[in-house]
Structures are given as C-alpha cells and as structure tokens.
Image (cartoon, rainbow, N blue to C red):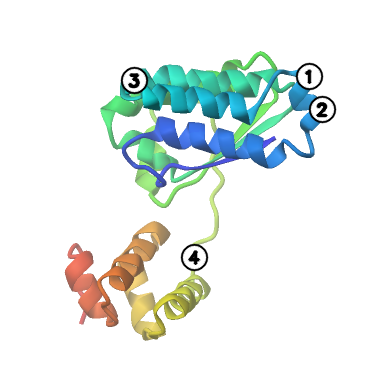
Amino acid sequence: FPVYVDFWANTRSPVRVFCDSVLAAIERYEGPLKSLLKSKNMSSVKLANAIELKRSEGRLEGNELSLANLAFDQLNRLDAPVLLLLDEVQQLTTNANFSDFTADLRSFMVNRPVKNVKGIFTGSSRDGLIKLVNNTKAPCYSSSSEIKFPRLDQRFVDHELAVFRDVCGKSLNASKAYAVFETQFYEPGRFIELLKKMILEKVYDIHEGVERFDKSITTE
C-alpha cells in the first residue's frame, strides 16, 4: 500500500501534508482494495470527515498530532505492507515544532503492530537528510541506511530546460545552465527552484536569474 508524501506541498505543516497524502492513497486504492478496506473499517470518507470536522471547528492547528495519529490508525487497520515514499523529507528538520510529528512518524515506522512498513527518504538537500539520520540526537538515528545515487549530470539539466521551455516558450543556454548547476553543488532542488522563480518572474536569462534568486553564487 504505497503512500507518496511531498513535504514541500505545504512547508508550514508536515502533518497536513501527511494526512492529505494518506487520504489520497486510500481514495486511489479504494477500488482495487475495496473488500479489504471494508473488512478493516478503513474509509477515505471517514478520514476526510474527521479532517474537515477539525478544520470546521477551528481546532486543526492545536490538534495536528491527533490528526496525524488518526492517519496512522487508518494505516494500521490495513493488514498489508505499507510503503511510505517521503519526498523532500529534510523539511522536517527546518522547524523545531516539527520534532513531535517526526518522532511519531518514526515510531509508526518502527513500532507498527503489523511490522511490514518501509520508508524511502528522499530530498534535494543532503545536509538536511543527514540531520535526520546521522547523529545520536537525529530523529531517525539508526533507523535507516543510505543509498548513494550517481551525481546528476547534463541530462538532468537538459530535461529541466525542456520543462522550462514547455512552460514559458523560452530557451536557456544549456552550457551556461550546467555551469550554474555545478556551482550549486549539483543540488537538484536548488536548481529547480531557481528555474521556477525565473518562470514566475518572467526572467529568461540564467545569469540574471542567479543574480536575483540565488545570490549565494556568482556567474560570469
């Protein structure tokens, strides 16, 4: 039972992102898993109603952890393997207020009554991922193993430039763009964010984009 979570979808509330992602996963699989979901009293309608009730009562902010626990309970009712695909998970390290949810998330993954739960942690910030797993005070210390992926190359830059061209009809110089990507230490999220800002602000020169939106580097 796969659940994809993009923590950049709402950077202020990882709990809302997680709950909405669980809800979307349940809705997506209610057809193929209808009999199993019914037998476990698991329903996207039930979860959605609970979320909307808390929102309508104006109590969502103060009860976010209880809302997360509702999502965990829904997953526990499904007696099946669960795969959590946690994207941009380094976002959990950016605010101390996220620490309780992060601890609950780890507890769910480690202590789920039905043990077969796995998680894939991905992110565009290596330093952020390290904060989650690499020291004794990290929220996910000793509960993960690292897989080193090959460094992204010109093909990644060409793909993103093609997306840029499809969105706004403008082309960027590929060699200059790759030089910027190198200077950004090959961080995909940083490069993509630069292109997004350029599109939104109608900036069609990579050097001008760097000057305006990524001033930590310089270009010639």
Task: Indicate the secondary structure of the residue bearing disc 4.
Answer: loop
Looking at marks 4 and 1 on the same chain, the residue that comes earlier in the sequence is marked by 1
In three-dimensional space, the C-alpha distance between marks 3 and 2, rounded to whole angstroms, equals 33 Å
Q: Quadrant of the C terminus?
A: bottom left
Q: Disc 2 and disc 4: Cα gap in Å?
A: 43 Å
Whether residue 185 is visible: no
Earlier-in-chain disc, 3 versus 1: 1
As measured in the structure, the alpha-carbon distance from the residue carrying label 4 to the one carrying label 1 is: 45 Å
On screen, residue 204 above or below 151:
below
Q: Residue at x 36, y 78 (%)?
A: 177
Viewer-side residue, 100 vs 16: 16
Give the distance between the C-alpha atoms of the residues marked 4 and 3, in whole angstroms: 44 Å
Q: Which residue is mark 3?
A: 59
Q: Are marks 2 and 1 in contact (CB under 8 Å)?
A: yes
Instruction: Identify residue for label 2.
Output: 35
Callout 3 secondary element: loop
Q: Within the image, what quadrant is residue 185 found in?
A: bottom left
**For mark 4, does the 10 Å Cα neighbourhood hold few (<14), some (14 to 19), or many (20 or more) residues?**
few
Location of mark 4 (residue): 152
Q: Tell me which label, 3 or 2, sits earlier in the chain.
A: 2
Residue at (54%, 50%) from the top-left corner?
A: 148
Residue ID for mark 1: 39
Q: Position of residue 214 (x, y in %)?
A: 22, 64
